[in-house]
Image (cartoon, helix red, strand yellow):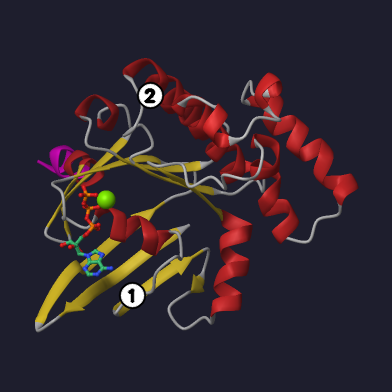
């Protein structure tokens, strides 16, 4: 599903060049569940933004379902994003003046789906996320866990194949955090490919495949360790 080849992303800050991603190779198959850990500044969010087609590589290639994405224009990237990718952020990124329901509905509106078709899709997600009695609340009338559930609803309403979560439990207490992770894991059980960036080792350990990043590179990948330990 996903292949990164020698992917680089550097940022020029004054006369300094920061290599946020440094010749990174990575393959992810459909349905995998990965965690991404590593120190602050190691490139985890840059990697997620890259996988989510929110940012472009400085060099290298990102293949998404057999499409080389590095030369695509903004419109083509937006289409791929809508079709394949859902994003969940630590700080929810909900639109404050829209209700929970309207936030979840927004990607369908942007995709040009007619109101009559939107309604059952949104209803299904709201029921699924146990948000029925909060659907008409604004984000600032919701708890952190509820806000994150709305953000997950918005991320999955288009039925993406890939769900990218950047520290999704970072602002939550441990109980709401566990609920959010369990919800993401249920979606993975149903077939969605799931990548979770986290600083929490206990959450990182739940994933079937663990990546550790250091200095813009993948310093360890539990998938490779399994292969090499079988080989030895
Ligand atoms: N827009 C930008 N401009 C300049 N430098 C950037 C930019 N975005 C990221 N960087 C740099 O790239 C490196 C990787 O940043 P990134 O946000 O990916 O780290 P991270 O692993 O997600 O860290 P954290 O755990 O703190 O969220 C850092 O050194 C950061 O300063
Ligand atoms: Mg980050």
How many numbered marks are there? 2
Residue most extreme to the top: 175
Q: Is residue 198 visible?
A: yes
When asked about the image quadrant of residue 110, the answer is bottom right
In this rendering, does residue 191 appear at all? Answer: no
Examine the rendered structure and indicate whether residue 155 appears above or below residue 67. above
- Majority SS type along the magenta span: helix
Q: Position of residue 95 (x, y in %)?
A: 57, 48
**Which residue is at a point 13% across and 78% down the rendered structure image?**
17
Q: Furthest residue to the right?
A: 116
| Residue located beneath label 1 in the image | 57
Q: Quadrant of the C terminus?
A: top left
Position of residue 28 relative to residue 73, above or below, is above
Q: Is residue 137 left or right of residue 55?
A: right
Q: Earlier in the sequence, mark 2 or mark 1?
A: 1
98 in relation to 140, above or below: below
Helix or strand or loop: what does disc 1 sit on?
A: loop
Mark 2 falls on what kind of element?
Answer: helix
Which of pointers 2 and 1 indicates the residue nearer the eye?
2
**Ligand 1 under 8 Å from disc 1 Cβ:** no
Q: Is mark 2 within 8 Å of ligand 1?
A: no
What percent of the width, then of the height, locates residue 209? 30, 38
Q: Residues in magenta?
A: 227-232
Mark 2 residue crowding within 10 angstroms, few (<14) / some (14–19) / many (20+): some
Tell me the residue at 56%/49% (across/down): 161
In depth, the one of 182 and 105 nearer the eye is 105
Residue 165 magenta-highlighted? no
Instruction: Please give the name of the residue rendered at 41% of the width and 60% of the height, measured from the top-left corner.
Output: 51
- Residue 88, horizontal then vertical, whole percent: 46, 44
Q: Position of residue 75 (x, y in %)?
A: 60, 77
* Residue position for label 2: 177
For the residues labelled 2 and 1, the Cα–Cα distance comes to: 32 Å
């Amino acid at each position: 599903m996903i292949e990164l080849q020698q992917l680089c992303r550097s940022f020029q800050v004054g006369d300094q060049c920061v290599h946020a991603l440094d010749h990174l190779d990575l393959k992810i198959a459909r349905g995998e569940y990965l965690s991404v850990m590593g120190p602050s500044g190691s490139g985890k969010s840059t990697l997620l933004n890259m996988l989510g087609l929110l940012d472009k590589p400085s060099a290298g290639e990102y293949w998404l379902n057999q499409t080389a994405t590095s030369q695509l224009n903004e419109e083509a990237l937006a289409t791929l994003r809508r079709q394949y990718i859902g994003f969940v952020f630590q700080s929810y990124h909900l639109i404050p003046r829209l209700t929970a329901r309207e936030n979840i509905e927004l990607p369908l509106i942007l995709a040009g789906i007619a109101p009559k078709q939107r309604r059952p899709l949104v209803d299904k997600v709201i029921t699924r996320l146990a948000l029925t009695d909060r659907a008409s609340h604004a984000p600032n009338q919701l708890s952190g866990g509820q806000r994150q559930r709305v953000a997950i609803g918005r991320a999955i309403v288009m039925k993406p194949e890939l769900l990218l979560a950047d520290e999704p439990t970072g602002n939550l207490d441990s109980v709401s955090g566990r609920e959010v992770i369990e919800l993401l894991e249920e979606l993975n059980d149903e077939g969605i490919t799931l990548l979770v960036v986290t600083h929490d080792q206990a959450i990182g350990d739940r994933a079937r495949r663990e990546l550790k990043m250091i200095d813009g590179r993948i310093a360890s990948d539990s998938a490779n360790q399994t292969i090499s330990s079988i080989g030895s």
